[in-house]
Image (cartoon, rainbow, N blue to C red):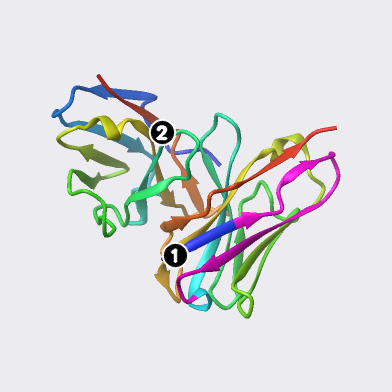
Amino acid sequence: QSALTQPASVSGSPGQSITISCTGSYSDIGGYNYVSWYQQHPGKAPKLMIYDVTYRPSGVSNRFSGSKSGNTASLTISGLQAEDEADYFCSSYISNTTPYVFGTGTKVTVL
Amino acid sequence: QVQLVESGGGVVKPGRSLRLSCAASGFTFSTYGMHWVRQAPGKGPEWVAVISHDGSNRYYADSVRGQFTISRDNSKNTLYLQMNSLSAEDTAVYYCAKDLVRYNTGWSFDYWGQGTLVTVSS
């Protein structure tokens, strides 16, 4: 099963906003609202940042926001901070024999 | 607080079997679906399997169907993953993860364990 497509890297200066895209198809992102975003620091388990396209779990900073348009989901980080430097993975339910897929991952660098 | 603690990983020869465990605490285990997710070295996560809160439904990734079996013991608050006929492609850190939604599958994982490394090598 093909992974969702993300840019390999995105960078920004402290205080800036960045957006990470996640492109799929009508059978995953385009067809369902089960899009999530995870943050992963080196050697750590992933952490849920966004679920159901736009919702933030309790305790996640409101600097993180999610959206979707057609077959593409996006994660925006506003007011970039050094602690945001990490890998980010999108994910989605997919109408397929493998019902769940992750994205290729994006490394966020804070300049 | 929610805790998920995996165990059972290690080095195993190709063709052998291994059973992973995930001990859960801090929430009502029997009311949440549970997932296994693996991550090969230097790669992104790969979803492996899910089991419903009561164990009545199980779904697998194509890559492990027929090879891995997910199960749970709600009396022991423990999730399992039985892995058979292991090959080098199964080398990864294996995480158990709690589903966000109660009594259903929400397809988001709000708590993860620390992971257990499985290395398949002769």
As displayed, is residue B112 above or below residue A65? below
Q: Is residue B21 magenta?
A: yes
* Point 38% across, 32% down: residue: A6
Label disc, if present, on residue B2 of the rendered structure: 1
B117 sits to left or right of A80: right
A71 sits to left or right of A78: right
* Point 41% across, 50% down: residue: A92
The chain under label 2 reads A
SS of the residue at dot 2?
Answer: loop
Identify the image quadrant of the N terminus of chain A: top right
Picture quarter containing residue B122? top right
* Point 41% across, 33% down: residue: A5
Label disc, if present, on residue A50 of the rendered structure: none
Measured as percent of width and height from the top left, residue A2 is found at 52, 38
Identify the image quadrant of the C terminus of chain A: top left
A94 sits to left or right of A26: right
Residue under circle 2? Answer: A5
Mark nearer the viewer, 2 or 1 = 1
As displayed, is residue A23 above or below residue A61? above
| Highlighted magenta segment, given as a residue range | B6-28
Q: Amino acid at mark 1?
A: Val
Q: Is residue A27 visible?
A: no
| Residue nearest the observer in this picture, B43 or A109 | A109
Picture quarter containing residue B51? bottom right
